[in-house]
Amino acid sequence: MSIIVQKFGGTSVADSNKILAAARKAIRAQEEGHQVVMVVSAMGKNTDKLIALAKEIDENPPAREMDMLLSTGEQVSVAMVAIAIQHLGYKAVSMTGAQIGIKTNNSFMKARIESISTDRIRKALNDGNIVIAAGFQGVDDNYNITTLGRGGSDTTAVALAAVLNAESCEIYTDVDGVYTADPRVVPKARRVKQISYDEMLEMASLGAGVMHSRSIEFAKNFEVPIHVRAAYSDEPGTMIVADPESMERPVCGAAIAKDEVRFSICGVPDEPGMADRIFLPIANHQIAMDMIVQNVGTNGKAEISFTIPATELSTTLKALDEVKNSIPEAFESFSYDNNLCKVSIVGLGMERQVGVAEKMFETLAARNINIQMISTSEIKVSVLVDKEQGAEAIRAVHDAFDLGSVPSDVKPLVKPEMISDEEKIRLINRLKHMEDVLIESVMLDETQASVTLYGLPQEPGNAARVFKSVTEAGIIVDMIVQSPGDKFTNLTFTVERSCADTALKVAKELAQELGCTASETCPPVAKISLSGTGMRSHTMIAARILKALADGGLNVAMINTSEMRFNLVVDAQVGPKALELLKEELKDVIAD
Ligand code: ADP
Ligand code: ASP
Ligand code: MG
């Protein structure tokens, strides 16, 4: 018999009436002939309330005890849903994460699922029960209760759908699908019929809170189609599947991360290995950095900047203190800015079309919005802007790419075919633990060169001005990295080697016009791209990559990360050596 997993978020089980409505949805699915597993979150804002309660006593409560506390939120709702189903005359059994056998590691408050046993669930289903599983929680090897991180019930649901080879995984929430941007921020946002795993993964990790990004890693790795729908209606919603909605559009959506903190570490000795003295301790605290930019100053000292979510501010400060105390020469000083937000555009089609980044920069320039940092990858462009300009920025960008209108090539929804149980088991067995990082490929690109504008005045419109000239000259740009600075910034980008002379000429003209300096040459560079899942959230991967290169005596000139790609640029002549070093270092996580 086919299995359906239905997940209900906090708002969808906020009171008894909503619990009864959720119970009826599950009963309906069972009546239609399915076995039903429900995954539920804590009622309403209960998790927030529990956190506030703990903080009344301690601002930084111990993580183990927080997990003990927070897991009770879900325990209340599973019992309530089971009571509702039984009251309606059907069989139901509620289970905590530990009772199901959701084994996690022991990273309290950020635990990762290692394995899930299906025996108890299957037995209860075969006995005619609707099984109600507590979302967001598991148990470690020492019987400690763990939680998966805020929003983690989505991950429980998709993970259960994977191990049970469920026919579908329905996510019932307070919005009727995935939109081109958060409809609360962008009123013109449009509900999409379908979005690809890759795009949803980027959107989620860049701020689209409708799905927990780790749930999309599960969906992608184990081929679980997800159906996001409203708990309050029967509208069709959005399918998250392998293929994108439109092939013609370069951008499928925009996202905003409202609370970003940018760190700038100054006076880092410019020698291989110095950067990872800083990155390693941060990675050890499992802080996922984004927008990492490294700059070499004129005095032989480098400046490293990166962004983190505001929730990680105190842990990052702690990690940097640890570095300074143990290695005083690791850096001279650091500063941070927590008045920023990150606005991103995402789309698989971006790689095929030129001028996407330029259009975003131009749109922001036209609104006089200053771009404080830029980082791009094949599937996204992210910029940092002032917090109070964030909403205006995302609305403007959403308009500029016409995301509110339906693309002309949208196809009718086709329900993806189910894969066999044997194939599902093969996919799961590829990994030792279900949430292990998976690197699918490591590639060396020896076709690019790089050019830098140093000391570009930090004014709205300058990035747009640069890329307008570059695009007009017919130059194809790949990576763009803009470092932060109060008054001046450095802007580095890579171009096809055949365009190097033209790029240099354009850069020199721009330097004259904008009052900055262009690099003397446009040297060939080697770009190494790692693609897979989990490279950003498994924070040790970035640290291991940088350490392996440093130990091999190699300097990294540019880095940009996204959920599915980790790109770095080194001098052209050391490209093959860098490739070998990385393949060796990461052989335990590279897929066969
Ligand atoms: P749940 O409690 O059901 O897990 P969440 O609050 O976690 O619900 O997620 C739903 C919310 O996600 C919506 O109310 C919406 O404001 C927000 N959201 C952010 N980005 C998007 C997007 N691109 N599409 C739809 N909703 C989004
Ligand atoms: N209750 C948890 C939270 O609020 C998990 C979830 O809702 O997904 O983060
Ligand atoms: Mg959620």
Image (cartoon, rainbow, N blue to C red):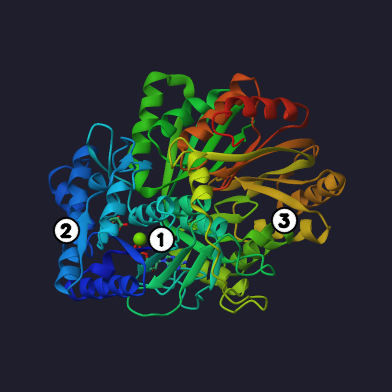
User: Which residue lies under the disc numbered 1?
Assistant: 209
What residue appears at the point 29 percent right and 39 percent down from the top-left corner?
108
User: Which residue lies under the disc numbered 2?
Assistant: 76
Where's residue 342, x and y in %?
Answer: 49, 56
Q: As shown in the figure, which amino acid type bears the numbered disc 1?
A: Gly
Report helix, strand or loop for mark 1: loop
238 on left or right of 346: left
Examine the rendering and report whether any part of residue 410 can be seen: yes
The reply to whether the C-beta atoms of the residues labelled 1 and 2 are less than 8 Å apart is no
511 on left or right of 274: right
Say which of 146 and 52 sits in front.
Answer: 146
**Eye-nearest disc, 3 or 1:** 1
Q: Is mark 1 within 8 Å of ligand 1?
A: yes
Judge whether 82 appears above or below 269 on screen: below
User: Which residue lies under the disc numbered 3?
Assistant: 466
Q: Quadrant of residue 345?
A: bottom right
Report helix, strand or loop for mark 2: helix
